[in-house]
Image (cartoon, rainbow, N blue to C red):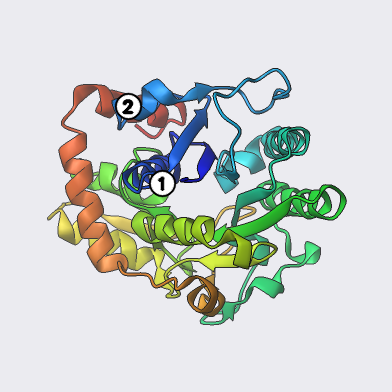
Amino acid sequence: MPKTVLVTGSSGTVGSALVMELRRRKFDIIPLDIKPCLWDKRINRATVRHDLRKPMSKLRLRKKPDTIVHLAANARVHDLVVKPELSMHNYLMTHNLLEYARERGIKEFIFASSREGYGESKAGVKRKESDTHVSTIKSPYTASKYAAECLIHSYGECYDISPVIVRLSNVYGRYDISERVIPLFIYYALRNRHITVFGREKELDFTFVDDAVDGFIQIIQRFKKVGGNAFNLSSGKGEKLLTLAEMIIKNLDSKSTLSSIDKRVGEISSYIGDISKARRMLGYKPKVFLKEGVAANIDWYCNVTTERRILEIQRRNLAKRGWA
């Protein structure tokens, strides 16, 4: 019998891609999100609408999951600097989901954490899974992820819930029309608008969505062997944010101009993931790197945003920040 997998944050970038791929592979999927899925009508119809900030004790799913993949979060570092109460929401969502797992006897719990937990890195240095420490935390967002990891491990010790921690880094690709860096740069470049890079020194590890999804699927399939571990899922290569912006402008033959200023409070300027553990234990092997991935991302974006409804959603999101 195929595993039944509960995926929270199933309408997001990674969530949408993961649910689609798991369904293609004949897993039994229960998507859960507070928002609708814009990309697949079948997933949207199947999505359980629930605000994870509220207890799940009265929530009745159609079937008990074998595995929980917890992707739901307030995920923008700067947003949680401006509104630190959002970091408490991240912790609360994880607590409520763990309580549901404890009450229902669900033993397999996969948590999407973040490379932010490693704090600032020296340029070119790759960070291993053991490199996190409370003293490296630089933002409320990071604190929410670090605290959630601690809580998950405590439930593992006390309630026999086996955790896997996945530390993601700048996932990009299909199903993203947010104000995150790549869709934002594409939005501006298509309109020949000036692009400002926050952090002229920034060098980060960008992960194509298909590679991240493949890593999650390998964990689900091998959970009995890899439970209790943490894994970096990224490309294992650093790319300058300025180079990324130049790449997008060139790809679109845009007249956008480019400048850089200091990074914002709470953000880190350097991170590259050591993915050797994921390679060894999961067979993880990233296939799409930034030049190829950005071209694919632009092709998808230009095609999907011809749909007026999708374009209007992004415009409204940016307008809320004064960026449209």
Q: How many marks?
A: 2
- Name the residue nearer the viewer: 277 or 256: 277
What residue did someone put label 2 on? 42
- Name the residue nearer the viewer: 78 or 58: 58
Q: Residues within 10 Å of mark 2 (few under 14, many from 20)?
A: few
Up-down: is 263 above or below 57?
below
- Indicate the amino acid at tag 2: Arg
Q: Which structural element holds mark 1?
A: helix
- Indicate the amino acid at tag 1: Leu
Up-down: is 178 above or below 113?
above
Q: Is residue 300 visible?
A: yes
Q: Position of residue 307 (x, y in %)?
A: 18, 27
Image side of residue 8 versus residue 81, left or right: left
Q: Position of residue 23 (x, y in %)?
A: 36, 41
Residue plotted at (27% across, 42% down) = 187
Residue plotted at (21% across, 45% down) = 300
Q: Is residue 256 visible?
A: no
Residue plotted at (40% across, 69% down) = 240
Up-down: is 110 above or below 201?
above
What residue did someone put label 1 on? 18
Image side of residue 324 versus residue 225, left or right: left
Q: Position of residue 242 (x, y in %)?
A: 36, 65
